[in-house]
Amino acid sequence: MISAPDVVAFTREEELEDELCSEPPLPEEYSVPLFPFASHGANPWAKVASSKFTRDFILISEFSEQVGPQPLLTIPDDAKVSGTFDLNYFSLRIMSVDYQASFVGHPPGSAYPKLNFVEDSKVVLGDSKEGAFAYVHHLTLYDLEARGFVRPFCMAYISADEHKIMQQFQELSAEFSKASECLKTGNRKAFANELEKKLKDLDYTRTVLHNETEIQKKANDKGYYTTQAIEKANELASVEKSIIEHQDLLKQIRSYPYRKLKESDFHPYEPECAPDPANAGCDPDPTTSDLAEPGETHLYAHVPSYTPKLIKAKSAKCFDKKLKTLEELCDIYFFTQTLDQLHQIERTFRGDVCYLLTDQISRALLKQQSVTNFLFEDVSFLEEKTPEKQYRGCQGLRQDAIDSKCSEESPAPKVVISLGSYKSSVECVPIKMEQEIEDSQEPQMTESVTFEHQENLDYLDADIKGSISSGESIEVLGTEKSASGLTKSESQASLPISPSPQAGRSKVGSRRTVSEDSIEVLSTCPSESLIPEDFKASYPSAINEEPYVDDEEGGLHFTPKLNPGNADEQEDVSKQENLVQVDSACCIGKESPNFLEPLPDLGQKPCDEDGVVRIPPQPYRQAEQGLRGSFGGFPSHDGISGGLLPYELDSRYLTGSREVSKSSLDECSDSTSYISSAASTCSDRTPSPAHPPCPASERHKKKAGQNALRFIRQYPFAHPAIYSLLSGRTLIVLGEEEAIVKKLVTALSIFVPNCGLYAKPVKHWVTSPLHVVDFQKWKLIGLQRMASPAGVNVLHALSRYSRYVSILDADSKTLRCPLYKGTLVSRLADHRTQIKRGSTYYMHVQSILTQLCSKAFLFTFCHHLHLPISDREPEESVVNRRMNFLKLQLGLANEDVKIVQYLAELLKLQYIQEPGQGVNPLLRFDYVPSFLYKI
Amino acid sequence: KSSVQTIGEDQIKNPYTELLVLKGHQDIVRFLVQIDDCRFASAGDDGIIFLWNAQTGEKLFELHGHTHKITAITPFSSSDASEEQEHLILTASADRTVIVWDCTSGRQVQKVSCFHSTVKCLTVLQRLDVWLSGGTDLCVWNRKLDLLCKTSHLTDAGISALVELPKNCVAAAVGKELIIFRLIASNDGSEGWNVFEVKRLVDHQDNILSVVSINDLTFVTGSHVGELIVWDALDWTKQASECNFWDSSVQPDVQPEIKLSQSPNETSVQHLTSDEECVFAAVGKGIYVYNLKMKRVIACQRTAHDSSVLHIEKLPNRQLISCSEDGSVRIWELREKQQLPAEPVPTGFFNMWGFGRANKQANQAAKKMQESTPMYFLELVGDLIGHSSAVQMFLYFGELGLATCSADHLIILWKDGEQESRLRSLTLFQKLAQNGDLQIKF
């Protein structure tokens, strides 16, 4: 084991927000973690790294017994990706940290060679000279012809952004484990095949030799053995021995502990057709049964018939022959699956880390909003989400992983589509990120390990100083290899709360800039510590319980320990609020520096301190324009050759005042995202695919946002129309031309609350007369206007049911709907908005709607607002209380009340719905007069 | 041109702000019967009977058994107090069968198929624990579906309506005639009953469409040409100075143009309902309120709907609900008119009826009476628009709302949105408590 030389005490700078602690702290899981490196006075974008490659890639290398470390392939398989980056050199480096002593061969005291089922090891290492940081996943594959039957390989995710590796360690580890498992499964299969062939060869050889010996015996009547005969006999004996050895190997490879796989939530890609190796034992193969011992069976029945070859003695251990390629080492099915998986990893982690984190956080937070998230979010999308998102919400996500396994197996075609849609999506926001994410594997260490770890951290501290001068050094910051040597019971015995190693990490981060030429192994963790059973055991308690001490399974603690100084600050930020802020930061900063409007106070603390500024930071406009100017607009994130953009260009990034830097970030989030992607502060200059698993919806959002933007600019009566949608009154878009109507419907669909977990209640195009059932089912309908008698019927039905609908006439540009005097919609749809992009506007809408959801949630789940406190309390006082709450507490004016009431009704229906039983679609309506709006 | 009173979208008094469409039927839904506090059955031309939960709108059972349209349906609850109450329904169909269904299990209990003609009406005499089927003849059955007795063939048209009268009597409307039958216990056994025709009343000029019992002493019949007769339930005589609309229509003081404009369809008494004081009649497109004490129409809405009113019901809170072929349901409130001396007396159709008056003098007397007694009028307080075709019937469930059935194959449950919201909140917090979600987790 390589020990970590130094340890840094974990401290975190006291945050300035102490005075804000007066508010009751919010539940911790509702707080958006603050950007972890903000305290270093830096911007959220990755550190400068003069890497020689343009984007992240995956490298597979082998430590060849013949030529030493060599790169095998990269993903994406494109020479441009790695650029001038020296893959050979880097292969050497990453292979050189594979320290695990996996002894294979003849262990002392054993007659036969033994296969070791070694666990993969996972390390993070950095090479600041190359500007490359890598998550390295070491694995060994079996090869009959290799020395000790093993071939060491590694898969590395290489990025210029250290933080990305660190923060996504958990996810990377999980994903690479899958790929590795897949590869190894295929390899075992191939190995078993190979062994069988070899056994056949040997058997054939034995028969031949035996025959020869017999012949010799017969020919030899002298009564003594010739040297030739003795040689033959020796040869025969060695073949016999070899057969026994190989049979033993075959047994071993078949007895691979599948138990492990079965208990895990991940089953490697078992092809349907292939028989499960685990139960191959009951599948006797006639071709081998003669040479195999009784009961010995063949692994794969459908192996094509094989003609045995004669094996020359001593030919087995020959070093001048060509070693098998990776492809040959692995069953082809599994090999392609592995490649698919790696491609998916590459796609998933593409882009700036901020984007990934934001995405993960918002997804995880949204997932927690199980009560309200169905209203405006695509829940199916949330649920389908692949399991690599483990940020705190990992519990549920992990569960999903099981379900979505099948869909994961062939994800490639889906994601490819996303390439078209991610252009505008690199929008990053300053979020304080709790650093514990990547540390979640650490608490698994046993007590003794913790000590070691502490030591390591101490060493690390020392090493920081040391490494500045050290020209070439390998620093292993944390390694848990020793954990694997400890027994399970030991590891269960003690549950040290990790002393927040992220401080060390952070220090490492800051240190990295000064260390010249070094490989730093930041964290290693043998996969044993990550085997999924441990995950499972510890997950249930991971989310909500702060004290893990009673967690009997000394496994992972995904819930980070909050720094006490930080806790209050983080806790008093409501989840929704943060989401909203995140969103608004995204879109507001984008194109409209002066668009910012005060976010309504949810009765929480004023939110200026935690990330988003409410007042348009006018003074910075100039600067921003300068920024824009200097880059000639932002045509796209691709293709901008990244000259370094010095931070000094805008001193705001370095300013000590958080407030200011926040605001500037808000304002310039567009620019900063540009910086991150173009100016090489970011490892990965490729734009992130916006939600990789469902690109279609992303494009839809963009389009819908664009159309909505056009709608609110074009129609002065957009507000009452949107109000109709939000309050559950069906809006009918009437028009002759299908395209126009559909466009309007698409635009307005982003305002339609979902009634359940199903698709949005939107019907794009209808030609038949509507009925009351339709209004029950659809909340937004595109309706064809026809001149024919049938058209008259359509209109007649409309006038008959005018009580239930608002009618937007796309042809005459009129709207017939109830009056709206509230304030909410004007914030949602300001026709003077400076937002120009569809996706930005979509996010803006989403943020306001999320806020609305939180209001609806509060309203719905306040007991006394709906039910009397005591039995004697008259209904009127409850009603009064309710209205007071809506108006005074939630600050809703006039018709806004109805929106929240409608959403609350939907929440109730969703909550009380019995599982398995569909919601009875209700049609709620009001008896309110409608008015005709004209342009 | 339409003189139908309309109401704007501002319907403050209309409590029904939520609706639930119940789909299931494949043809006109004609009948709704209440089974118990929260269940009801629907039946119609598709021959299927559905049982629904009035609270949730959940479809409880789908009863198949009839091959033709349903012609009559009635609940038949057991009177055994000892056991758990058994809820049965009887359905008669054009396939000439009557089926007894168990509402709890949703199963067919028994089927009678020995009818010579379609049974058009069913009545349960709870006191005697027998039920009667009326077709071309009248049959008396006991609970076990044994035929106890039957009358001879009456007419080909058959009995259109049956109503129970005191003293083991029933009144059957057979065409223009009203026939009174009496059930007499047979001498030989305790189970047996014999049915005898007691009297034939031939006062109506046209087919009797509706018969309704008001109390133990009176019942009312209405005919196709708009006659409304109040009968004494004991001696089956027209009550003193009962009106005969046909006669009143020939009164000279009736304005001829109105008379001319009224086709028989528009004067037919489609449905009658009553409370202790008044009889409410759905006559043509209009609604009339006839006060039994004053023996005159006290309020009316001549054109309450765009087309014929099919069903009408009085709610406990002085409200009246009517449904019509025009597909709408309207809620009315019987209100006392502010005494405005200048208010002209409603003229036209009700004057034509001339309740209790035989001549002009009486008319004048009536005017005086009107001045001395409070005037009433029917105020439209709300309308329910949902069906696209004639609303055949409705069922008022009080707190649970209102179920309407229609020729558009749908049943709509109308509910008080406020109340439903409250109920949902209640359920929500109950479920929260159940799930233990009320414990603060965060």
Image (cartoon, coloured by chain):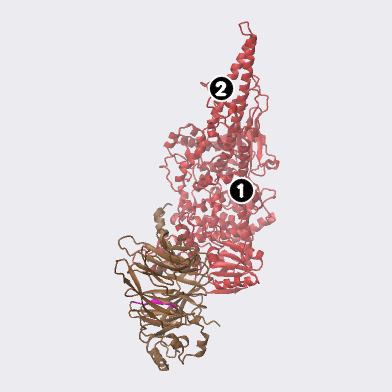
Q: Is residue B301 left or right of residue A664?
A: left
Local crowd size for mark 2, using a 10 Å CA cut-off: few (<14), some (14–19), many (≥20)? some
Q: Dividing the image into 4 quarters, which one contains the C terminus of chain A?
A: bottom right
Q: Which chain is brown?
A: B
Residue A797 rendering spot, x and y as whole percentages? 57, 71
Q: Which mark is residue A65?
A: none
Q: Which residue is mark 2?
A: A244
Direction bottom: furthest residue: B361
Name the main secondary structure of what is drawn in magenta: strand
Q: Secondary structure at mark 2?
A: helix
The residue labelled by disc 1 is A352
Nearest to the observer: residue A724 or residue A402: A402
Q: Is residue A908 magenta?
A: no
Colour representing chain A: red
Residue A564 in the image: x percent, y percent? 45, 48
Chain ID of residue with mark 1: A
Q: Nearer the viewer, residue A717 or A165?
A: A717
Query: Does residue A618 appear in the picture of this structure?
Result: yes
**Front in this rendered view, residue A826 or A218:** A218
Percent x, y of residue A420 = 66, 52
Q: Amino acid at mark 1?
A: Asp
Q: Is residue A928 left or right of residue B134?
A: right
Magenta extent: B208-215
Residue at 61 percent across and 29 percent down: it is A194
